[in-house]
Amino acid sequence: QVQLVESGGGLVQAGGPLRLSCVASGRTFSRLGMGWFRQAPGKEREFVAAISWSGGNTRYSDSVKGRFTISRDNDKNTVYLQMDSLEPADTAVYYCASSIYPTAAGGQKTYNYWGRGTQVTVSS
């Protein structure tokens, strides 16, 4: 089993940066792809970014490409989401998830463990 705990959320002004962290428990972390998803009020949860087990491959949604960067440190069992040039539309609860595959998968159905989320609010 994998347990995931997100941190780093908060209130930030538009244009500012924020970095989210997700610490995972369990020995299999370094063999699994990881992803970040978000859910805004009244909307369905959507894919944000994913990274392969080695960090060598990443994938982003069109809405965050060029502004967000996903990375991981397998020695620390941690995956990060660096968010730059934040926009009010980025306001959401952000979730970390671990994939059933070692690749950077985009589909939610390929993720079987989820954190409880961290709130990100971007003010205009």
Image (cartoon, grey):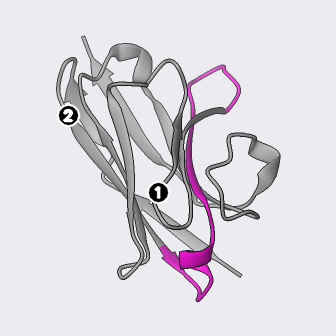
- Which of the pair 105/111 is nearer the observer? 105
- Quadrant containing the C terminus in the rendered view: top left
Q: Type of residue at label 2?
A: Pro
Which three-letter amino acid code belongs to the residue tagged 1? Gly
Cα distance, mark 2 to mark 1?
Answer: 24 Å
Asked which secondary structure carries label 1, the reply is loop
Does the magenta segment cover residue 84?
no
Q: Residue at x 66, y 65 (%)?
A: 102
Left/right of residue 73 with respect to residue 55 in the rendered view:
left
- Name which residue lies at 42% across and 76% down: 74
Instruction: Between residue 41 and residue 36, name the one nearer to us.
Output: 36
In the displayed structure, 92 sits above or below 27; it is above
Which residue is painted at 66% across and 21% down in the image?
Answer: 43
Q: Position of residue 24 (x, y in %)?
A: 51, 74
Quadrant for the N terminus, please: bottom right
Considering only order in the chain, which callout, 1 or 2, is on the residue closer to the N terminus? Answer: 2
Range of magenta residues: 24-45
Percent coordinates x, y for residue 72 in the rendering: 39, 63
Which residue is identified by label 2?
17
Q: Position of residue 116 (x, y in %)?
A: 57, 57
